[in-house]
């Protein structure tokens, strides 16, 4: 159940240059959040910036009533958030949106593809899949422009998931795009393997993940979109996305409609998206 909460900042950690992990205390959000959901944060009590900022929920520990956010400092809102101190309180709306569907099959393999800060919601997802099916069912492919842009590699490895790494410049792991690692993985999987794919990162990367998944005939491909948001609850229509079908459930592709990423997502079946 979403609500508006005063959340206490517990820790602020710079995990890489310009990347911050903020740990907050809020038992309600920690208890209710599901992998793939997000929160809307009021980064200042003043009017500038006026709008709340959306952040993916990165990790939760319900037993301690805490959850964390992982983000890149790229604008005024994230800059303000990054310099807050432990003990400060922030107003947060959440948990918001629709999260990932990990299915019910214990036989399926789960492949997570993270591009840069797209790793933020996928660590929470990794933990959820591990808890339900075991980490031996999980493969994480994480990539970035350089090794400084690789996030959560240590956490993914420590969970017990298989991890593949790529960098565009070859400074760490495979020299090339993360989508090339995905193609290799799918080509080498055992026959008749049921595969569920989840991705978050740059738009072009997710579009390519969707194409590769479709051609490989995977069981499911879900993407977490990062359209610019304002209200976070589907009122302002600032984060609309073109979706196949004139009505929900119609995936014929002959018609399309607009939907709000904040309310009807941010997670969507990749086959529903009209990629532009």
Image: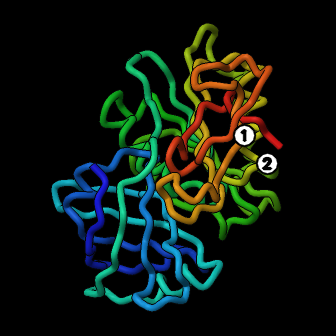
Give the mark nearest the N terminus, 2 or 1: 2
In the image, 94 versus 84, the foreground residue is 94
> Residue 24: x percent and y percent?
30, 71
Q: Is residue 197 above or below residue 85?
A: above
Q: Quadrant of the C terminus?
A: top right
Residue drawn at 35 percent across, 31 percent down? 134
Marks 2, 1: nearer the viewer? 1
Q: Is residue 135 visible?
A: yes
In the image, 21 versus 77, the foreground residue is 77
Residue holding disc 1: 242
Q: Under tag 1, what secondary structure?
A: strand
Badge 2, how many Cα within 10 Å: few under 14, some, many 20+? Answer: few
Q: Which mark is residue 258?
A: none
In whole angstroms, how far apart are the C-alphas of marks 2 and 1? 16 Å
Question: Residue lying farthest top?
Answer: 192
Quadrant assignment, res 60: bottom left
> Residue 21: x percent and y percent?
44, 72
Q: Is residue 128 above or below residue 44?
A: above
Quadrant assignment, res 129: top left
> Residue 253: x percent and y percent?
76, 22
Residue drawn at 51 percent across, 57 percent down? 120
Q: Under tag 2, what secondary structure?
A: helix
Q: Which mark is residue 204?
A: 2
> Residue 165: x percent and y percent?
65, 50
Badge 1, how many Cα within 10 Å: few under 14, some, many 20+? Answer: some
Q: Relative to residue 123, is residue 88 drawn left or right?
A: left
Q: Relative to residue 254, is residue 73 drawn left or right?
A: left
């Amino acid at each position: 159940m979403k609500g508006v909460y005063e959340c206490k900042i517990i820790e602020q950690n710079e995990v890489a240059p310009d990347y911050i992990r903020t740990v907050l205390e809020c038992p309600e959000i920690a208890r209710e959040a599901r992998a793939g959901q997000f929160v809307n944060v009021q980064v200042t009590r003043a009017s500038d910036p006026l709008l709340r900022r959306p952040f993916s929920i990165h990790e939760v520990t319900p037993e301690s009533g805490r959850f964390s956010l992982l983000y890149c400092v790229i604008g005024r809102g994230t800059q303000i958030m990054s310099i807050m101190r432990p003990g400060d309180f922030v107003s947060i709306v959440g948990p918001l949106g629709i999260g990932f569907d990990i299915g019910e099959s214990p036989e399926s393999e789960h492949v997570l593809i993270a591009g840069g800060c797209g790793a933020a919601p996928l660590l929470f997802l990794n933990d959820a899949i591990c808890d339900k099916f075991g980490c031996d069912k999980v493969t994480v492919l994480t990539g970035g422009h350089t090794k400084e842009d690789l996030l959560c590699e240590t956490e993914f490895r420590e969970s017990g998931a298989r991890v593949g790494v790529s960098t565009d410049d070859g400074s760490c792991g495979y020299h090339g795009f993360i989508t090339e690692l995905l193609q290799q993985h799918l080509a080498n999987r055992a026959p008749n393997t049921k595969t569920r794919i989840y991705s978050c990162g740059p738009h072009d990367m997710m579009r390519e993940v969707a194409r590769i998944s479709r051609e490989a005939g995977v069981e499911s491909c879900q993407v977490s979109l990062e359209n610019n948001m304002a209200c976070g609850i589907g009122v302002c229509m600032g984060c609309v996305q073109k979706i196949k079908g004139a009505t929900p459930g119609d995936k014929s592709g002959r018609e399309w409609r607009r939907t709000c990423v904040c309310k009807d997502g941010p997670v969507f079946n990749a086959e529903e998206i009209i990629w532009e």
